[in-house]
């Protein structure tokens, strides 16, 4: 048994060192002053610049655009290949757009359906549903396509507080992650049951397969969702990255002058 444990630790250390030695190699870029971006399963990139959302499939190849007018997204998510979710926290409204950036349902006012203070919104993969974190009642709710609440977790005051509001929410592989700046990532299962807080000083989070990705400055750590213990891999990233996304083939870094696309190589 001791021998097996030793072998496992050696392999793990080797993988960790290998990740440390990986270097980011940029291959493409899309220039612009973008505030938000997302990437779908087909590699289509969605970028928000002021009141315009554009869809790209390759470098500087704009396929579709749409004007949002008075709508200013605070988050955009294209994890479901058939639609893109766009949320405006200031106005508590969201829109769903199809693959041609055509508005599917029109403006959805979350306050009008009983959510007092929507802070964050993200897709759920349990059917055609999505999550909303309601800061007014400190609850986590899941809604269906008819905008009916199908599940909710209440009394989350001990996890979230108004002095340090959560800044990001993602669901992936049976877990819901909510980033609380300077505190950590609150982890829930797909039914909204609270599991634990993973302590971190990360400013952005992402997901890839069975890993939670945590950005702290110029470092991204990958933590396995098997036990949510220490980081399995660490990557050095370019300077001044505001947001990021990892796919199985590419890595995306949003900077002030545009989106940089590339990959890590040893």
Image (cartoon, rainbow, N blue to C red):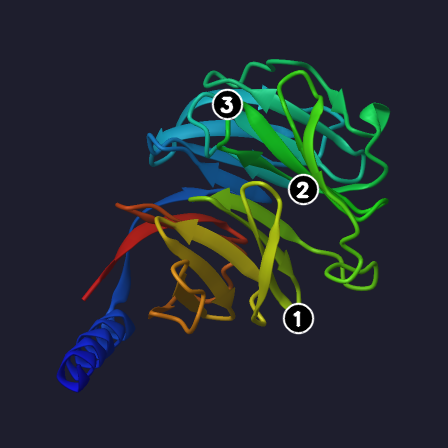
Marks 3 and 1 in Cβ contact (< 8 Å)? no
- The label shown at residue 83 is 3
- Disc 2 crowd rating (10 Å Cα; few below 14, some 14-19, many 20+) is some
Of residues 105 and 152, which is closer to you in this image? Answer: 152
Is 46 placed left or right of 155 in the picture? left
Label 1: element kind:
loop
Relative height, residue 182 to residue 67 (above, below): below
Residue 219 point in image, percent of width and height: 43, 70
Callout 2 touching callout 3 (CB < 8 Å):
no
Tell which tag, 2 or 1, sits nearer the viewer: 1
Residue at horizontal 70 percent and vertical 55 percent from the top = 166
What is the C-alpha distance between the residues marked 2 and 1? 20 Å
Residue labelled with disc 1? 182
Q: Residue at x 41, y 33 (%)?
A: 40
How far apart marks 3 and 1 lie (CA) works out to: 32 Å
Of circles 2 and 3, the one toward us is: 3
Of the residues under marks 2 and 1, which one precedes in the sequence?
2
Camera-side residue of 168 and 62:
168
Whole-percent x and y of residue 262?
30, 51
Instruction: In the rendered view, tell whether residue 109 sits above or below residue 11.
Output: above
Question: What residue is disc 2 on?
Answer: 74
Percent across and percent down for residue 178 are 61, 53
Q: Quadrant of residue 34?
A: top right
Inter-mark Cα distance, 2 to 3:
17 Å
Q: Position of residue 266 (x, y in %)?
A: 18, 66
The residue depicted at 47 percent of the width and 53 percent of the height is 206
Instruction: Please tell me in which quadrant of the rendered image residue 164 appears.
Output: bottom right
**Mark 1 closeness class: few <14, some 14–19, many ≥20 residues within 10 Å:** few
Q: Establish if 106 lies above or below 20.
A: above
């Amino acid at each position: 048994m001791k021998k097996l444990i030793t072998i496992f630790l050696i392999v793990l250390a080797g993988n960790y060192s290998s990740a440390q030695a990986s270097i980011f190699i940029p291959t493409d870029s899309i220039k612009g002053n973008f505030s938000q971006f997302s990437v779908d399963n087909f590699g289509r990139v969605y970028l928000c610049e002021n009141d315009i959302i554009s869809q790209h499939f390759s470098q500087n190849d704009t396929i579709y655009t749409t004007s949002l007018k008075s709508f200013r997204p605070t988050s955009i998510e294209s994890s479901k290949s058939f639609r893109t979710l766009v949320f405006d926290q200031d106005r508590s409204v969201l829109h769903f757009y199809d693959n041609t950036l055509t508005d599917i349902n029109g403006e959805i006012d979350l306050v009008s359906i009983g959510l007092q203070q929507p802070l964050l919104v993200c897709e759920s993969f349990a059917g055609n549903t999505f999550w909303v974190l309601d800061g007014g009642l400190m609850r986590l709710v899941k809604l269906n396509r008819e905008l009916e609440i199908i599940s909710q977790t209440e009394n989350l005051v001990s996890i979230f507080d108004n002095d340090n509001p959560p800044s990001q929410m993602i669901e992936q592989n049976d877990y819901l992650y909510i980033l609380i700046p300077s505190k950590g990532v609150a982890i829930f299962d797909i039914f909204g049951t609270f599991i634990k807080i993973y302590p971190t000083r990360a400013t952005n989070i992402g997901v890839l397969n069975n890993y939670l990705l945590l950005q702290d400055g110029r470092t991204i750590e990958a933590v396995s969702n098997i036990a949510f213990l220490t980081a399995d891999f660490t990557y050095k990233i370019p300077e001044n990255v505001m947001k990021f996304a990892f796919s199985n083939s590419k890595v995306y870094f949003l900077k002030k002058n545009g989106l940089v696309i590339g990959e890590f190589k040893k």
